Amino acid sequence: MNITVLYASTTGNAADCAQRLAKRLTADGHEVAIHDLGRYTSADIDKATTTFVCISTWGDGEPPDDGIEFVDYIKALEDGSLPNLRFSVLGLGDTGYEFFCQCGKDVDSHFERLGGTRIAARMDCDVAFEEDAEKWTNSIAEALSAREVSQS
């Protein structure tokens, strides 16, 4: 199974979470490609089948600079245009801000609106994110493992 892990990060925490997820899934035997959203061709999401996004929220609910183009792209897609997408989203933020994890919430809702199937629940992480990010990684690994067993 080809898996794409995408991240957009201001401080590097989302990149770290994406790298941990990719390392875990690779160890589980999956083929994984990891991309910074600033270097990812937005149109590639049209071809993606299993995609996991780690994204932080900046300012008043905006994506980090490297995620702006991607978020704008998926926001503009027509409803139901990604019916083959399987996904999950990890949002990083700070509960001290009004728009806590807004980018993660937005990406998650856009993927759902586009017809994607959520294979693990979105996780919204506060400043001390490590434990929740690990729970998210484990939930993805378990969901992929259960899917493989059911296809056997």
Image (cartoon, rainbow, N blue to C red):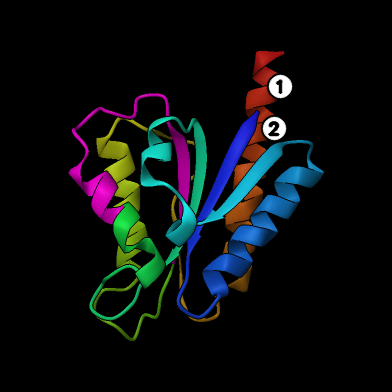
Do labels 1 and 2 touch, CB within 8 Å? yes
Q: Residues within 10 Å of mark 2 (few under 14, many from 20)?
A: few
Quarter of the image where the N terminus is located: top right
The answer for how far apart the CA atoms under marks 1 and 2 are is 6 Å
Quarter of the image where the C terminus is located: top right
Q: Secondary structure at mark 2?
A: helix
Q: Is residue 16 above or below residue 41?
A: below
The residue identified by callout 1 is: 149
Q: Position of residue 83 (x, y in %)?
A: 35, 25
Whether residue 64 is visible, yes or no, is no
Residue 100 is drawn in which quadrant? bottom left
Residue 95 is drawn in which quadrant? bottom left
Q: Is residue 44 magenta?
A: no
Q: Secondary structure at mark 1?
A: helix
- At 75% from the left and 44% from the top, the residue drawn is 26
Whether residue 144 is visible, yes or no, is yes
Q: Is residue 89 magenta?
A: yes
Front residue (pair 90, 149): 90
Q: Amino acid at mark 1?
A: Val
What range is drawn magenta here?
71-91
- At 63% from the left and 32% from the top, the residue drawn is 2
Q: Position of residue 80 (x, y in %)?
A: 25, 27
Q: Position of residue 65 (x, y in %)?
A: 36, 71
Dot label at residue 88: none
- At 46% from the left and 40% from the top, the residue drawn is 87
The residue identified by callout 2 is: 145
Front residue (pair 42, 1): 42
Q: Amino acid at mark 2?
A: Ser
Q: Residues within 10 Å of mark 1 (few under 14, many from 20)?
A: few
